[in-house]
Image (cartoon, rainbow, N blue to C red):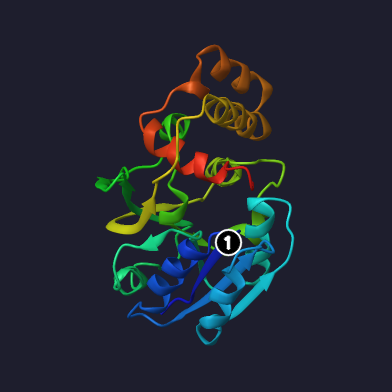
Amino acid sequence: MPKISIITINYNNATGLDKTIRSVINQTYKEFEFIVIDGQSTDTSVDVIKTYEHCINNWVSEPDNGIYDAQNKGILKSTGDYLLFLNSGDVLADHKVLENVSDKLNGRSFYYGNLILESNSHIIEHKAPELIDVDFMLNSTIWHPCVFINSSLFKEFGLYNTTFKICGDYEFFIRCLLKPNITTQYLDLFITQFDANGISNNPQQNQLQTEEREKAWRMNVSELIYENLKQQNSFKRSKYATVINLLQKWRGKPRF
């Protein structure tokens, strides 16, 4: 069975961190390691970590340079075959998620599933597409908390680019998917429940998202292709704009 590394980053979200930790340690599948990267929180986050310290394989509480710097720290500490990024506040959809996924992780680059969104006491289920291609990535993205990433990709193609504030995972997906021999597999399973309560509409975050998605393509395709995409206004379209915005606005809160 593959070893899964679950990486949780946190800053001043003790309540959310407690929820996340409990959802991980209550999994029926136990072939995983749990890594918590805290950005030197000033609330009770470290107390929460110490409460569950016996269930956490590796943790640190120290300053970082943003969300992707923190996630890179987790990657460098990980030893699993596949990595899942479950930020504080995110919870696995049920206690059998890892058990249901584990026998399906057999060598592909990315395995991805469905997302449950909780907003204002409403639960909305979002299903991922069965096919990930370039057109889909122009319109949307793979939902980071629902993706099991082959650890070899970080060795071959590098870590997250820390110049991004909210779209570093998107850039990494683009960087990999444009390479030959990258494979993906849709898992028709709900992987993660994301708490979107308290996230408001912020035009500045919408603009930042557009700018960073554009930057991701510019870094990874030729100038000719980039200019063609820009002329078609490709970077502003999104079939799944609501979900993407909520996920990325959460990352773009003042801390990050």
User: Which residue is rendered at x = 57% and y = 72% of the image?
Assistant: 35
The x, y position of residue 146, in whole percent, is: 40, 55
Q: Considering depth in this image, is 98 or 53 the residue closer to the camera?
A: 53
The x, y position of residue 63, in whole percent, is: 74, 60
Q: Which residue is mark 1?
A: 9
Locate residue 107 relative to residue 66 in the image: left or right: left
Instruction: Examine the rendering and report whether any part of residue 158 can be seen.
Output: no
The x, y position of residue 13, in whole percent, is: 53, 59
Q: Residue furthest bottom?
A: 54
Q: Residues within 10 Å of mark 1 (few under 14, many from 20)?
A: many
Q: Is residue 10 above or below residue 125?
A: below
- SS state under label 1: strand
The x, y position of residue 117, in whole percent, is: 32, 48
User: Which residue is rendered at x = 73% and y = 66% of the image?
Assistant: 62
Q: Amino acid at mark 1?
A: Ile
User: Which residue is rendered at x = 34% and y = 42% of the image?
Assistant: 131
